[in-house]
Image (cartoon, helix red, strand yellow):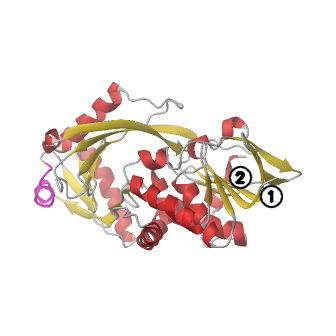
Amino acid sequence: MPHADVVILGGGIIGCALAEELARRGQRVVLIERSRIGAEASSAAAGILAAQMDLTTPGPLFELCQAARQLYPRWVVHLERRSGVSVGYHVCGILYLAMTGRQAHAMEGRARWQRKLGLRVERWSPKDVRRHEPSVDGRITRGFHFPTEAQVDNVRLMQALAGACRKAGVELREQMPVRRLLVSGHAVRGIQTDRGDLTARIVVNCLGSWASMGGTFPIPLPVEPARGQILAFSAPRRLLRHALMSEHAYAVQHEDGRLLVGSTVEFAGFEKALTLAGMYGMLSGAQQMSSVLNQCTFLEAWAGFRPYTKDRLPILGKTSLHGLFVATGHFRHGILLAPITAKLMADLVLRDRASVDLTPFSPLRFR
């Protein structure tokens, strides 16, 4: 029977990042993916690395995002060197546009506590906004600029990460659904797949929205898919200087000129559909920010599933079965949190401790 030190379930950015980290630390890692590497949320995202803008309160998730942001530049350099793929990482800032007094008031409070923590948030008048971002011509009340936020081309990032996995010796097995876990007593012993059994002393569930394994996972994992729809356009390069966000939409432009407008948050099960209501809402929100988007040419649209938990915290840590771990539920922050998740989970798997207290994220909190 084939054997590995560690089996990773799920070939999204979290699973691939952890697999690559563990392989570089000397483990024989097999990654199992039911479809293609990066086929779901990791490639469907827009690549915005928001460590501040959309976090409403301080706390464990906010601190985890700050740790991830510190790791990101070095992680990107590592992946690009290992794979030869440029991932389009750059710090361009996020500009949040408040259209109403209520929205401005809410963001003022967020900016206040973040500044107290030593983070940069700039408060711009409508005139300031148009000077720094000429594309904005909508009726706005206030702008809030988060200058240290970044973005990445997440599709190229997944290509680089897959290449780095292979370079590190990770065995990537695609098109291989998992039937069930192999358990003996109070310990996991491996997995059963359509192509036979695979034994391992460690199994890590990185299955994203599918983490409950159809209800067969041995502990409760209340993760559900939050559908997001995104529209892609061809646009002149540098049409936008920043990633633009409002309460109803965002617009972000990659270095190759592609401009993405998103995104919805819908709870419709695993129905990966594009809807008229969703597309209309995104376009209306984008047009409220800028009429220059009317110059863009439509390319394509898609939908994907973000793994969502009710408390909006990821699930990271040990389960009640020896050797069984979970790393999922990252919702909007999977692309950002990939390097810190890989580091902390690898530490936990190999040393039985992590440099960050993972108690708030424990899988056992749902018992």
On the question of residue 59 being in view, the answer is no
Please give the residue where the numbered disc 1 appears in the rendered image.
322
Question: Residue 49 bears which disc, if any?
Answer: none
Main SS, magenta region, reads helix
Q: Any magenta on residue 112?
A: no
Q: Image point 60% across, 41% down: which residue? A: 210
Compared across the picture, whether 320 is left or right of 264 comes to right
Q: Position of residue 166 (x, y in %)?
A: 56, 62
Please give the residue where the numbered disc 2 appears in the rendered image.
364
Depicted 281 relative to depicted 343: above or below:
above
Please count the marks in the image.
2
Q: Position of residue 68 (x, y in %)?
A: 47, 66
Q: Image point 44% across, 74% down: which residue? A: 74
On the question of residue 119 being in view, the answer is yes
Q: Residues within 10 Å of mark 2 (few under 14, many from 20)?
A: some
Compared across the picture, whether 285 is left or right of 324 comes to left
Q: Which residues are magenta?
A: 126-136
Compared across the picture, whether 134 is left or right of 223 comes to left
Foreground: disc 2 or disc 1: 1
SS at circle 2 = helix
Mark 1 belongs to which amino acid?
Answer: His
Seen as rendered, the residue at the extreme right is 185
Mark 2 belongs to which amino acid?
Answer: Leu
Depicted 276 relative to depicted 53: above or below:
above
Distance between mark 2 and mark 1 Cα atoms: 13 Å
Q: Earlier in the sequence, mark 2 or mark 1?
A: 1
Compared across the picture, whether 296 is left or right of 115 comes to left
Q: Position of residue 212 (x, y in %)?
A: 66, 41
SS at circle 1 = loop
Q: Image point 25% across, 60% down: which residue? A: 145
Q: Position of residue 333 (x, y in %)?
A: 46, 54
